[in-house]
Image: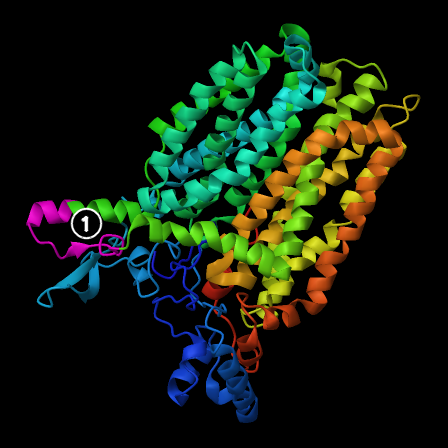
Amino acid sequence: MAGHHDSSRISDHSEDSDQPPQSNLQFHDITQSITAPRPLAHAQTNGTGISPTQTNGSRIQRNETRLSQKSRRASKASRDPNLDINLPYRTLTATANLEEYIAEKPEGEIQGPVAPDGKHQYKLVTFLPDDPENPKNWSKAYKWWCTMVVALTCFVVALCSSVISADIMGVADEFHRSEEVALISISIFVVGFGVGPMIFAPLSEILGRRIIYATTLFVAVIFIIPCAVAKNMATLLVCRAIDGIAFSAPMTLVGGTLADLWRTEERGVPMAAFSAAPFIGPAIGPLIGGFLADAGGWRWLYWIQLIFATVSWVLITFTLPETYAPTILARRAKKLREQTGEKEHVTEQDIDKRPLSERLRVFLLRPFQLLFGELIVLLISLYMSVLYGLLYMFFVAYPIVYQQGKGYTAGITGLMFIPIAVGVLCSAACAPIVNAHYLKICKKHNGSPPAEARLIPMMVSCWCIPIGLFIFAWSSYPHLSWAGPAFAGFPVGFGFIFLYNSANNYLVDSYQHQAASALAAKTFIRSFWGAAVVLFTGQMYARLGYQWASSLLAFISLACCAIPFVFYFYGARIRKRSKYAYSGDDEETLNTGSGRATNQELERAISYVSNP
């Protein structure tokens, strides 16, 4: 496992102070190495195979000056050549030796720090070579089973968010409430998607993934039942809120689970398969819900959720073992202490004595610091919010166009969502093309391309969204064929995965160890906007009409198309002035040599490409 770096769990720095993120994976922070010529040369190589003797001396000197200026900005991110975004940067201190989580040592341990008594030295427990407890060494068949279980869970969660949209009026009529009040049952569920990760992401890094999966899904299953038998709107809304928060945990953890299972060079297909699940679920939900609502009423929309969620809970609780390396090694260290009576067998988590409140502080504060203080995070989050809101707007717009405008049943209206699902599948199938293109860029830049290279798929696919919306808008006249609005969903679905993956990858490369907080900020604002859109879509279509309501969103998405182009051409300058972003100062130095990146480095570089 040594030498393979994971890519799906986005991690952040461990301390809430404005100290620069560090990693001890046998590298030196370039901003800390500028005072001595030899460390600087080591920092320049950073595993890229570029010798300092191959670069122009004056160029290096200029970069040293820039780095000297940047080093005074202590909170600014620097490039981590061994970045492993599956490691617990946020829950451990900056001095933690994270090599224990990626190394495979014959002796099963590496040397740790000196114990507080000054007489003993800790031994950090590691995996053994070909260790059967290491998830990456499990058989491919079992890893695929685990992948399908977590992908199914992700699909079920997404389906539960949308399936009730098939019969909102049934709820409103039974409880004598307006349609807007009934729609809150969708909105409040989506709000949970933004709140939950703030809690479950840090807990999973401290307690492990399996216990979070099992407990949150169990809570979600239990609180579906009151929704199905609710006697009033208050019961329905409270239980939907709890379900939204509980169901957010699997959505938060699935990407990290896949990174636990697959090595970097194996991850492309599993990640492509998984990245489609969160977008197919919302498209299939109205399809299933429409026919169920026609046949059995709105309560069956909750019973079907209970069936799917129970199956997912059983599979993930009883067939998916713990996959998070820090948790597995912590249990192994505890067992060694019990067997040998020696207290020196530990992991970095065991010797971190900080209170839980201090360790959680960065999870709660840093996302908002980035959201309101970083232009890149703010604009990317706003763009992703527009897309997310568009997805949930369709749950209200399709029934308006087809049921009110054309007189279709809920079941037939659900069929109109199929082109969105097909578009998502087609874009997922194109992942190898994106990977191959980015691999060429990596080779051109000796394994260290600028973060803006991640925006190329976004620059191409961003046009799909307004195209689809304009088609949807001006083919939605009641007297026209059903085909126009339905097939307008294909380009929209096709653009979703490209845009989301590009946005996530750009934030990871721009913010390095701070990336998890950047993504948390994006998820937070995205979820609240998605929840709000559901509430005013009906009034918007009533006031503006079918054509101009959809056109308004098309024009907004068209304006957002400028965002990737602005960052592509000006992103490097923005990052230089940023407080937290990686500025790219060492990219110029890294690319001045004639050395070539190794295959391992290129594999690591493309490993984020399919990160959902």
168 vs 238, nearest the viewer: 238
Above or below, comparing residue 28 to residue 288 in the picture: below
Of the pair 158 and 421, the residue shown nearer to us? 158
- Membership of 341 in magenta stretch: yes
Stretch in magenta = 335-353
In this view of the protein, which residue sits in the foreground, 154 or 199?
A: 199
Residue 428 in the figure: left or right of residue 590: right
Q: Give, as a three-letter code, the residue at label 1.
A: Ala
Quadrant including the N terminus = bottom left
Which residue of the protein is positioned furthest toward the top in this rendering? Answer: 296
Q: Is residue 506 above or below residue 188?
A: below
Q: Is residue 159 left or right of residue 261?
A: right
Mark 1 highlights which residue? 333
Quadrant of residue 282 in the image? top right
Query: Dot 1: what SS?
Result: helix
The picture quadrant where one finds residue 319 is top left
